[in-house]
Image (cartoon, grey):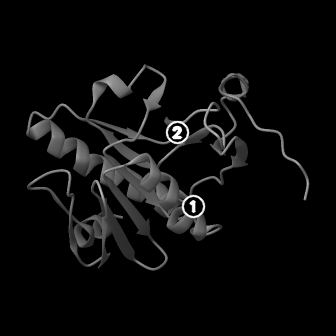
C-alpha cells in the first residue's frame, strides 16, 4: 500500500479556491460537481430553514457548501478533517471565525451523491458522530428517502422517511420539512 502524505491546514488553505476537496484524516478527496436535483434540493431546504429561523428570531446561522467545517486538526492522531456539508446550522457563534466552522455544527444535511453513496451513509456518518454533531440528515434523491440521525451524549437514534413525509428537525421544537411540498416545487 502506498504511503500517502498528510495535508496540513496551511497546505489546505493554500489550495486553489476552485478545487472542491474534503480532508479526511489528513488526506484530500476530490468532490464531484452536484447535479441539478442536488442543487434544487439544497436551495429549497435552505429556504425552509432560513425562513423558519428568521420568522422565529433565531440566532443560529445556516450555511451551504462550499463552507468548511473543521472537525479536527492535524494535531490529532489521524490528521486534519475538513468537510463541506451541503447544508449546516451553527448555533454557537464562537465556532465561526469568518472562514469556517471550527467544531461540530448543530445540524448537518448531506444530499447523497450518485457516484459515492457510501461516503454520506458510512464515512461522514462516522465523522459527524465522533465530532458530536447533534443531528445529521442524509437526503437520497435516487431512493427518495431521508435518514435522520439524532445524537445525544451516549447514544444515537435513527429514523427513516420518504419524500412523501414531513420530517421533524429535532434541534427545533416545532419545525418539520414537508418533502412532498418541496418535491412539488422541484
Residue wearing tag 1:
123
Q: Name the one closer to the observer, 162 or 127.
A: 127
Q: Residues within 10 Å of mark 2 (few under 14, many from 20)?
A: some
Indicate whether 11 appears above or below 44: above
Q: CA distance from mark 1 to mark 2?
A: 19 Å
Image quadrant holding the C terminus, namely bottom left
Q: Name the one closer to the observer, 78 or 91.
A: 78
- In this image, 67 relative to 12: left or right? left
Indicate whether 34 appears above or below 60: below
Q: Name the one closer to the observer, 22 or 42.
A: 22
**Where is residue 28 shown, x and y percent of the image?**
72, 43
Circle 2: element type: loop
Circle 1: element type: helix
**Where is residue 114 shown, x and y percent of the image?**
59, 69
Q: At 66% from the left edge and 39% from the top edge, which residue is drawn? A: 79
**Where is residue 149 shown, x and y percent of the image?**
34, 64
User: Where on the picture, by quarter, is residue 140?
Assistant: bottom left
User: Where on the picture, by quarter, is residue 102?
Assistant: top left
- Mark with earlier residue (1, 2): 2
Residue 9 numbered tag: none
User: Where on the picture, by quarter, is residue 78?
Assistant: top right
Nearer mark to the viewer, of 1 and 2: 1
Indicate whether 112 appears above or below 164: above
Q: Can residue 162 be spotted in the picture? A: no
Query: Are circles 1 and 2 on residues that touch, CB within 8 Å?
Result: no
Q: At 28% from the left edge and 53% from the top edge, which residue is drawn? A: 153
Q: At 74% from the left edge and 34% from the top edge, which residue is drawn? A: 7
**Where is residue 96 shown, x and y percent of the image?**
38, 25
Q: Can residue 109 be spotted in the picture? A: yes
Residue wearing tag 2:
66
Amino acid at each position: 500500500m502506498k504511503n500517502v502524505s498528510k495535508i496540513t491546514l496551511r497546505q489546505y488553505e493554500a489550495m486553489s479556491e476552485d478545487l472542491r476537496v474534503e480532508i479526511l484524516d489528513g488526506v484530500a478527496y476530490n468532490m464531484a460537481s452536484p447535479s441539478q436535483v442536488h442543487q434544487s434540493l439544497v436551495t429549497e431546504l435552505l429556504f425552509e430553514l432560513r425562513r423558519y429561523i428568521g420568522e422565529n428570531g433565531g440566532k443560529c446561522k445556516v450555511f451551504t457548501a462550499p463552507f468548511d467545517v473543521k472537525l479536527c486538526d492535524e494535531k490529532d492522531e489521524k490528521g486534519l478533517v475538513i468537510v463541506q456539508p451541503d447544508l449546516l446550522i451553527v448555533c454557537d457563534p464562537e465556532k465561526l471565525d469568518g472562514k469556517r466552522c471550527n467544531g461540530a455544527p448543530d445540524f448537518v444535511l448531506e444530499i447523497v451523491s450518485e457516484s459515492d453513496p457510501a461516503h454520506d451513509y458510512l464515512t461522514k456518518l462516522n465523522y459527524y458522530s465522533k465530532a458530536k454533531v447533534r443531528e445529521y440528515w442524509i437526503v437520497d434523491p435516487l431512493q427518495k428517502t431521508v435518514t435522520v440521525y439524532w445524537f445525544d451524549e451516549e447514544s444515537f437514534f435513527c429514523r427513516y422517511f420518504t419524500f412523501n413525509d414531513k420530517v421533524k428537525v429535532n434541534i427545533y421544537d416545532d419545525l418539520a420539512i414537508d418533502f412532498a411540498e418541496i418535491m412539488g416545487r422541484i
